[in-house]
Image (cartoon, grey):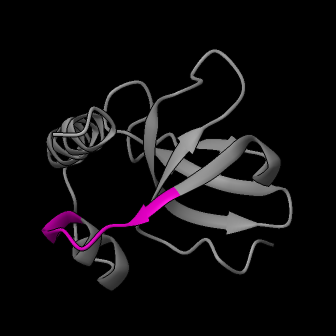
Amino acid sequence: MEPDIRISDVLVSCAGRDKGELFYCVGQDEAGVLLVNGKDRPLDKPKRKNHKHVSKVLRAETRVAGKLRSGDKVLNSELRRDLAFLARELASHNQGG
């Protein structure tokens, strides 16, 4: 298991057809991490991905991240909205804005 990846961390996929997409980590085991984004991968069907194929972007301090950490109910629409906001933030930082 990756010690630096925790539940509610935002990860980016580095391999596969979802390469470049942001996901929330909702769990992990020795085989990999469990990822959700609320769209292609809803909370009831997380994607298992090898640790080598993801990279940690940031430890999110959003309301959704807090809910994931505490085990509260999170809606897929909240995940989508949060990840879209974070993607825009990251894109503006990368462009120097």
Q: Position of residue 65 (x, y in %)?
A: 28, 69
Disc count in the image? Answer: 0
Farthest-out residue, top: 17
Residue at 61% in and 71% down: 5
Residue at 85% in and 56% down: 31
Residue 13 placement, left or right of 89: right
Residue at 24% in and 77% down: 66
Figure quadrant of residue 49: top right
Q: Position of residue 43 (x, y in %)?
A: 39, 47
**Looking at this view, is 73 or 56 the one in front?**
56
Q: Which residues are magenta?
A: 57-64
Residue 56 placement, left or right of 71: right
Q: Is residue 63 magenta?
A: yes
**Looking at this view, is 78 or 89 the one in front?**
89
The quadrant of the picture occupied by the N terminus is: bottom right
Q: Position of residue 57 (x, y in %)?
A: 48, 55
Q: Position of residue 68 (x, y in %)?
A: 33, 71
Figure quadrant of residue 2: bottom right
Residue at 24% in and 46% down: 86
Can residue 81 be seen in this snapshot? yes
